[in-house]
Structures are given as structure tokens and as C-alpha cells.
Amino acid sequence: MSLLHDRWVCLGAILYIDHNTLTHGSHTQQSKIRTVDLLALCVALVIPSSLSTPRPIFFNFAFDSELNCSLPLLATNTVLPSPLSSQVCFSTAMSGISKACCSIPPVVSKGYQPKGEYKTINGLKTYVTGPESATKAILVVYDIFGFFDQTIQGADILATSTDQKYRVFIPDFFEGSPADISWYPPTTQEHKEKLGNFFSTKAVPPKTLSKIPSIVAEGNKLAPGDNFQSWSILGFCWGGKIASLSSGADNKLFKAAAQCHPAMVDANDAKAVNIPMVLLASKDEPAQDIKDFEANLKGPKYVETFPTQIHGWMAARSDLESPEVRKEYERGYKTVLEFFHQHS
């Protein structure tokens, strides 16, 4: 899986404060999956091979109303692969909540004790959780702030639902040097410059994408029979971009994907997605970007905006001492689990 990792050139990052450029309406009603029947009605579509011209790709990044960061990436002499045949599902994919999805561990608001352990996977420190007997796996791509209790707890939730068991992996892609959470929100020029430098160096997507096939291959050695039946991928914030790009036309690793409060949402990425995808947005992602991305997804999908939540509510920026945040954090993980139960 090449994922263009050797053909993209990062031109830099532009960080700026603009309270007026982002759209903040509730997208919940528009983005809920369309209902036709309680049974899935899926139509196979073949997308023609038309994307053959290199094009600039712009990543629109929004933590919340205070930050918009564009990372221009130039595809040099790159022929973009056309999407594979896919399915469009017009059913109520999320119409019922399974027993497995409803039975997750209680969310701990403070002082969480991890249930998993750290292992070295493909040379990277990796949080691994879930029963050794699990036959399916989930790769979690954290946000730019790295390992946080809220993200670790989320991985444990994914691994310990009652029916379907998963082995969950969170690699330390930033190798011990994530972005400092004190940089956000970027209230000073220094913080803006540090965030911009981070996105244009350590967080350039191709650098991470190139590592994923080897991580999956080595992770499979921990499976019964040395091979998991399936892998899914879940990304938070910056990790959502990684999940989106990992689900493209040349994807052969993952059966389902999830993005939670994704950053750098690009509707063009959705055209190439060849697996079922769930996208959970916060009130802070540009609503039109989410709507356009959803419109371009041609396979089974579920898209919802959580109108009371900030960018980051399911990962490092989650305030689990708030009852409302804790409730929506739990609901978010239940939604992802239900989708993975159905499609992985």
C-alpha cells in the first residue's frame, strides 16, 4: 500500500486566528444516515478511472472556532488511483443498538487505570489492550497530543464490549514527542509557530502512513493463528486524516474506518474511500466540510455531529468530569463500536 507517502511534498503550515471563517450550526439532522427501510438496500457502483491528473491537496484543520490551519501538500508526478467498486447503503445502518454496544465499562472521570500494556510494535512503543483470544483488531491513531488517559480509556472501551472482542493498538507515531497541549489554544505567536512547525514536520501524513502496513503485519503476530480476521482503523483529530487516507482506493488492510472530531477534512479524500466509514464530528469542525465529505462517501456510512461537544471530546481534550461530556464521550464510543460490529 503506497498511499503516496513517497510522492508528497509538504509546503508548510499556515496557522491563524479567525473567529468568523468557521461555520458552527448543528449538522446533526443533515448528517444522519438516510432512512429508506429497516433492511439494508445497497447498490453497487463502479467509479470510472478519471482521477489521473496530479492536484494540490489542501488540509483544512480546525480544532475549534479559534484555529484554522491549512497544510498545502503537492502531489508531484503522482497519478491518483481511482476508487474501487463500492456500495452505497441507503439503510438505517445504525437503527438498532446491539447488546455488545450497550454493554461497555463505566467511564471513569478521573484517575483512570489502564487495562492494557505497552509493547514494542515495529519499533514503536504501542499501547495494546484487549483479550489475547480476540480475533479482530483495531488500530487507533491518537491526536497530536499523544497518549492521554481519555484516549487510553477509549481504547479499553473498544476492547472490552461484551459480545465482540477486539485487540486494540495505539502506536506512538510521534515517538515520545507529541505536541504540547499547552500550545492550544494558540494564544501567543510562539504557540502558533510551534503548532505550525509540528504539522509541517512530525505530523505530515505520509510519514505516518508509511509505517502502518508494517505495524499491522507485526500486530498480526499477536493474533490467534498469527493473523487477525480483520482490522479496523479509528483516528482522532489529526488521526482522522490518517484514517481517511488509509481507507483509500489502494486499501487492503482495513475493513472499516472511523473518524472522531476529524482534522483536515477534505471531501476529495472521501471519493476514494473503499470501506464502510463512520464520522463523528463536533460543533467545531466546519459544517460544510463535513457535509461535503459525507456526500462523497459511496459505501456504507454513518455521519453525525455532536452539537454540544468541542473538537477533541473523545480524546485528549475531553473533560470527563463534566456529566454532559462524559455522556457524549460514552455515546461516541458506543456508536463507533456498533458500526465496527456491523462492518468489520
Image: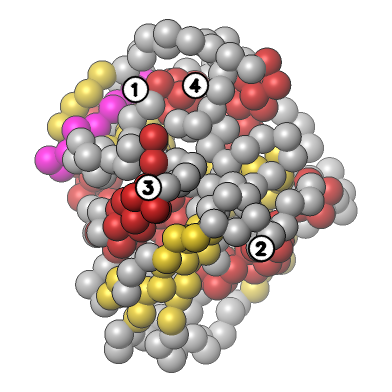
Q: Is residue 290 visible?
A: no
Color theme of the render: secondary structure
Report the Cα–Cα distance between label 2 and label 3: 20 Å
User: Mark 3 or mark 4: which comes first in sequence?
Assistant: 4
Q: Which residue is mark 3?
A: 191
Badge 1: residue crowd in 10 Å (few <14, some 14–19, many ≥20): many
Decide which of tag 2 and tag 4 comes sooner along the chain: 2
In terms of image quadrants, where is residue 235? top left
- Is 152 above or below relative to 69? above
Q: Which residue is mark 4?
A: 157
Residue 61 seen anywhere in this rendered image of the structure: yes
Q: Nearer the viewer, residue 44 or 338?
A: 338
Q: Which of the labelled discs sits on residue 129, or is there none?
A: 1
Q: Which residues are magenta?
A: 121-130
Q: Give the SS element for disc 2.
A: loop
State the residue position of label 2.
21
Residue 341 x %, y %: 57, 35
